[in-house]
Image (tube, rainbow, N blue to C red):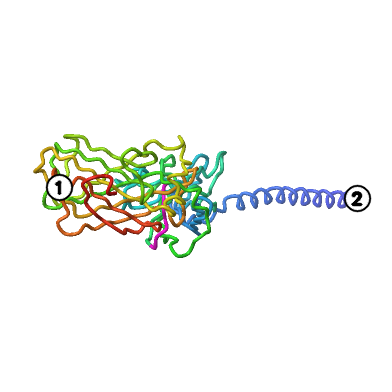
Amino acid sequence: MKKALIISVCILYACSSALAQIQKIEKPEREVIKKVIPPPPSTLPAGKDLSISIKSFQYDPANGGAIHVTYVVKNNGADAVDLNNVSIQGYIDDPVTRPTTTMPTYLVNGKYYYAGGGHAIASVSTMLNGGQEKENTLHCFNLAKEHYFNSSSNYNYILFVDKANIINETNENNNSVNWSFRGYEGQYNPSLNPAQYYLTDAFITIKTGADNKEKESEVSIRVIPSLIKNLSNDDHNEFIKKVAKNDLEFYSNSPRTLQLGLFMASTYTTVNPPTSLASFSLNGLGTVIEYKANIFTDAWKIEQVELVLHFKDANGIYHPTQGVKTIQFNMPANTFLDGFAKHYLVCKADAALNPVSVKVIDKLSAY
């Protein structure tokens, strides 16, 4: 009996040890099975692929003109992109339809544009994982130094992401987006002091008729901030241009545009009261083209004269509604200058800068 009891205890102990060994074996097997479960496959293409879209856009003509554009950058690839020093750059397509001193200078895809703001998305390491998006807002101020959007025309704004190509992407064709916006004509008309805006740039376009000016003949042009003035001994505060002998051709049936410069100004800054918008709005203006024929038989037929005047404040910002004035003078039939008695062509505009008279005179006293 005692022997049988000892045998039974030994059998139970052996079974218990075997069961413990089985449990130790089963536990790691379950962990291994759990670890080898694969993740779900990615639906994004391999590589890095940034794209950009515009969420909202606003051009505000107040306070010098500003663009506010909210954009979204997305990583369409499976690989994460570090946005550190990745740039956003905007450009403005503002076609040059009138003479100006501020031409577009940024060459993009074979065409010149104006700068339209830019910044880096991040200045420290910032990861954008596959499928993620980042939203931000770009601001560009003082656009009215170069642009005069007082029109009903449409303009184009282009926004690039990573234009410098610092990210090696699988697709470079979705790195830009276009946005069209209308000028503000009829939608913004603030009350501003015209005495704080000044004539900064003046251009004249002379359209020659069938009989052109000979190259050897001289021309002097004056834009005068008054309808009444003694021209013989006072050319202060005038915009002038002299064409010397053999200097420029004026071809038959063709226009020629010239820029005039301010002469003998009252001040050495833009702030020059005699050439302020307030002064022109009070006194009107006159334009005189003096012709010094090389020989008395050299006649010059003029069909049209056009002035383009730019008015800006002391900071170089266009007046929002009177920033650019275009005055067109159409000549009566057979308007000639020559070496006989037709030495001066006089074109005058009233206080609203509308053309009022055209005449040919022999002496300046007849201005």
Tell me where the magenta segment starts and ends, as one range. 145-152
Going by the picture, which residue comes out furthest to the left? 297
Residue 2 is marked as 2
Task: Tell me the kind of residue under disc 1.
Answer: Trp
Relative to 112, does residue 157 appear above or below in the rendering?
below
Q: How many marks?
A: 2
Q: Looking at the image, which is closer to me, 311 or 356?
A: 356
Residue 48 visible (yes or no) = no
Relative to 275, does residue 184 appear above or below in the rendering?
below
Task: Tell me the kind of residue under disc 2.
Answer: Lys
* Circle 2 SS class: helix
| Residue 240, image quadrant | top left
The crowd level at tag 1 (other Cα within 10 Å; few <14, some 14-19, many 20+) is many
| Predominant SS along the magenta part | loop
| Residue 215, image quadrant | top left
* Circle 1 SS class: strand
At 31% from the left and 51% from the top, the residue drawn is 307
Relative to 191, does residue 119 appear above or below in the rendering?
above
Residue 347 visible (yes or no) = yes
- Mark 2 / mark 1, whichever is N-terminal: 2
Residue 300 is marked as 1
Provide residue 217's location: percent of width, then percent of height. Answer: 16, 38
Q: Looking at the image, which is closer to me, 70 or 251?
A: 251
Q: Give how far apart the Cα atoms at labels 2 and 1 are.
A: 146 Å
Residue 87 appears left or right of 111: right
Residue 248 appears left or right of 287: left
